[in-house]
Amino acid sequence: MKHTTIDDCRIVDLRKISDPRGNLTPIESGADVPFDIKRIYYLYDVPGGESRGAHAHKELYQLIVAANGSFTVTLDDGTNKKAFTLNRSYYGLLVVPGIWRDLDDFSSGAVLLCLASEHYDAADYIRDYDDFLKYKNNDTSII
Ligand code: TYD
């Protein structure tokens, strides 16, 4: 999945079932996300000014949702970058493999919900930006 670009990533409009008792957004594998969901994690209690992410994945697909609050996801394919501010619980950001992501500007109380296509695998991460650029440029001496 080396040759993906930020144009392969997109905002997914999730269903919003409005109700005076409180709104509800369902997410189903295959219907709302184009992968089978094998893992869910959420990021919360992020101190003001902190950043997360700063890595890419080789095979993992993710849907990132601001379940509460807001934050910015900056995607980078090694050539182009695009920033998405997520601030609604009914929008997801589909991030395909081979894309570097930086997460910052977390609001107070922000909760980042992530649906992932694979179980956790440390070997799927690229954590060094120079290694990422080499990976995208097909330098097989690195990865
Ligand atoms: P990581 O994905 O590296 O977060 P970030 O890039 O924002 O720093 O995860 C941080 C730690 O949590 C890391 O030690 C691995 C662990 N972790 C799991 O054990 N399971 C998971 O599903 C995730 C996402 C992380």
Image (cartoon, rainbow, N blue to C red):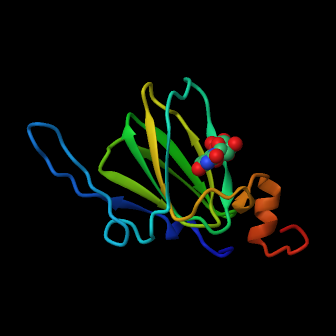
Residue 113 % position (x, y): 44, 46
Q: Quadrant of residue 26?
A: bottom left
Q: In the picture, which quadrant includes the C terminus?
A: bottom right
In-image side of 87 versus 104 (left or right): left
Q: Residue at x 36, y 61 (%)?
A: 12
Instruction: Say if residue 53 shows up in the picture.
Output: no
Instruction: Say if residue 23 shows up in the picture.
Output: yes
Q: Quadrant of residue 1?
A: bottom right
Above or below, comparing residue 21 to residue 32 in the picture: above
In-image side of 28 versus 115 (left or right): left
Q: Nearer the viewer, residue 68 or 70?
A: 68
Residue 85 % position (x, y): 44, 44
Residue 7 % position (x, y): 51, 68
Residue 133 % position (x, y): 77, 63
Q: Nearer the viewer, residue 118 or 56?
A: 118
Q: Residue at x 38, y 33 (%)?
A: 69
Ligand 1 quadrant? top right
In-image side of 8 versus 131 (left or right): left
